[in-house]
Image: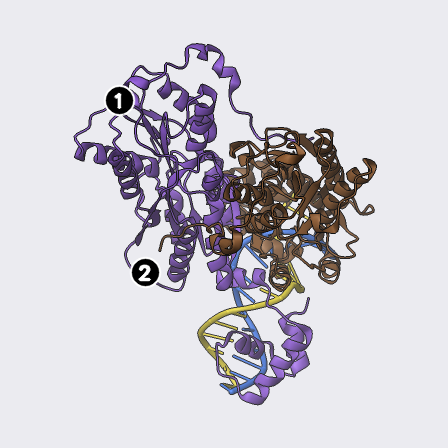
Chain colours: A purple, B brown, C blue, D yellow
Amino acid sequence: MANMKQIAKMAGVSLGTVSHVVNGSATVREPLRKRVMDAVERVGYQPSQLARGLRRDKTNMIGMVIPDVTNPFFPAVVRGAEDIAFANGYRLMLCNTDNDHAKEIAHLNELRTYLPSGLIVIPSNFSDLTAQAASYRKAGAAVVCVDRLPRDWNGDTVTADNETGAYEATSYVLRQGHTRLGMISGPGNLTNAQNRLKGFKRALQESRIHIGPEYVQETSFDKHGGYTKALLLLRMIGRPTAIFAGNDMIAFGALLAFRELGLKCPEDVSLIGFDDLELAEMTSPPLSSVSQPGYQMGTAAAQILIDRVRGDHGPPEHIVLETALKIRDSVGVPPAENSERVVGAMGATSESRTPRRRASTP
Amino acid sequence: MANMKQIAKMAGVSLGTVSHVVNGSATVREPLRKRVMDAVERVGYQPSQLARGLRRDKTNMIGMVIPDVTNPFFPAVVRGAEDIAFANGYRLMLCNTDNDHAKEIAHLNELRTYLPSGLIVIPSNFSDLTAQAASYRKAGAAVVCVDRLPRDWNGDTVTADNETGAYEATSYVLRQGHTRLGMISGPGNLTNAQNRLKGFKRALQESRIHIGPEYVQETSFDKHGGYTKALLLLRMIGRPTAIFAGNDMIAFGALLAFRELGLKCPEDVSLIGFDDLELAEMTSPPLSSVSQPGYQMGTAAAQILIDRVRGDHGPPEHIVLETALKIRDSVGVPPAENSERVVGAMGATSESRTPRRRASTP
DNA sequence: TTGTAGGCGTTATCAG
DNA sequence: CTGATAACGCCTACAA
């Protein structure tokens, strides 16, 4: 690959002049400039990002640290970030933490040796990024947190308005006449799960509806958790007539549980999710859900990051994106009180009937 | 961040010695070695990947170029690659091409200036990577293609056994008694789509079943394409009693079309997909599909790449992974011949009822 | 306006 | 076995 020295020789100018025209760091007189540009064109010269990064103490890379690309909500965020990054000449280094804080730290430590311009992080469970972020900032790199926030986070953030979204979803369910609601919430230490729970409770409160603590179950943000907790909720005496799932994956799991118990949705139980994944409309019945703008979360985060790199030293930004209630067919009116069919008597063996994980071929 | 010079000073040795102990490039006597290691530990020294890359003419980065992370099949591949990469000290730079060859080329060109160890690419439509790959190889970087192959590709490959998978799926459908099959195939220029079509045709041939060319529709690998083409197929006189979808997204679109036409699956039409996405079991009815090991495709690709970097100069590897037929509920016996309900009379306005794209919140 | 030269943090070569 | 020292490709004072 060609380098500046070669271009300089070809154009009959000094190496420094080449650098100046390439970077516009000094006005070079037209004839020289043209000679340089011609040489650049001719050999398709591109400056080495490595050398440049070494010299400038900063590369055009952005570390993107997420729990798991395989989790259907995150790719949208990644894609949004990549689009903005690419449009501005930045590249994304993708890291999966599996929600493991140790792995997260490991990634952050290694990433730093590439001198990225910044980090876009969807924190893992129990994340504490303050120390790491401080170290990155000292090196002139920006760190923005997305979707959920680590403990005591004081930097830039991009989140969805989880509380309002949950509030609206719950209110909608209440308006259909339900009074015994259940919630299958995400991990209690995740701020997004916390806020959705808060919205849920606020809506109940405003309607002066009380539910026992056993109606709120906490689990991980996945199908298996939703399945297990839905089973639990539905086997209670006085089972909920509607369930608010902390996210769509949980809702999908709940749907599996409904199916297993022979309960029809929404005739026997109503269900509403959060995320509005692309496949929510494919389930049976099509899932009502709170849509949150994953792609925009990514673009917003990348944009803040790039602004910071370009010298924006203002106070921390806290972008909160709106959610939107997406009504489909999974919420109906509550069943007549006396129609509650007892289920779950046969449930003793249900542990072994857990939904299969993704099939794998050797 | 600490550098070698500082470590050298702390340990009271020369810079070169530090390099030797860090890289094991020469045996350093124990006392010295220990002093160096202590200093390294104390300040948490990590070598600059930038400087190292500049010097070695190669970094520990792997460019991962895919059509779109947002497409549910690809994240598994990415994840597989990232796991192997991470375990070996490599990082992934993720690039989305949107199946646009120009964008693909742009990515490859820019990536090169980071001197990656190699590239894992899921080629775009009409991809021709021969020139680019040659240039990468000349620079000592490896290039492996995954899932589908560019025109005249002669390098390492990792693919699924698409033809066999499609053959088995089709045979299974035929065994249920169907004789009028339709196929909604992926883009004709994609090798994976071609091979699935080939498997489909081979199964038909072996059963001596002939279908007119209008029973094979080609479209893009997405829900919208599946929806449109399914509508078309189902409005034919003598419509197929079973449809083989080129991938699950197409199948999902077909399901939407069934729903719109009031056709029950599998009573009125059977359907089978390809990919076995995690959400195939959530649809109504649960979708039978050919499962292909995306994660393993990623790990295999990364492993080949790393082997190459480590000096494996053998002939091109062509890894073909097995698929597995996943039987759920979307394939049944064909409906009685005279029960074909005419549909589609009201379909004139259907263009406007296209499935919505993902909702976006401003 | 243009050129020169030092140095970013490493690795690798080559004396000692 | 250890220590200088010269690149790697680029940017940026500073000098001309």
Residue of label 1: A213
Front residue (pair B153, A234): A234
The image quarter in which residue A270 lies: top left
Mark 1: which secondary structure?
helix
In the drawing, does residue A4 fall left or right of residue B165?
Answer: left
The spot of residue A182 in percent (x, y) is 31, 26
| Mark 1 belongs to chain | A
Count residues near mark 1 (Cα–Cα under 10 Å), then give few for <14, some for 14-19, many for 20+.
few
Vertical order, B157 against A248 (above or below): below
Q: How many marks?
A: 2
Residue B119's tag is none
Give the x, y percent position of residue A255.
Answer: 44, 29
> Which subunit holds the residue at mark 2?
A
Viewer-nearest of discs 2 and 1: 1
> Looking at the image, do the residues carrying marks 2 and 1 touch, with CB atoms under 8 Å apart?
no
Circle 1: residue type? Pro
Dividing the picture into quadrants, the one containing residue B81 is top right
Whether residue B205 is visible, yes or no, is: yes
Quarter of the picture containing the C terminus of chain A is top right
The label shown at residue A313 is 2
Front residue (pair B75, A39): B75
Q: Is residue B25 visible?
A: no
Residue in the image at 54% along x and 64% along y: A52
Q: Is residue A209 left or right of residue B356?
A: left
Percent x, y of residue B328: 60, 28
Sequence-wise, the earlier of marks 2 and 1 is: 1
Find numbered disc 2 in the image and state the secondary structure of the residue it sits on.
loop
Front-most of B298 and D5?
A: B298
Q: Position of residue B161 (x, y in %)?
A: 74, 39
Please report the residue visible at 33 percent of the width from the left and 18 percent of the height from the top: A340
Q: Quadrant of the N terminus of chain A?
A: bottom right
Q: Residues under labels 2 and 1: Cα distance? A: 45 Å
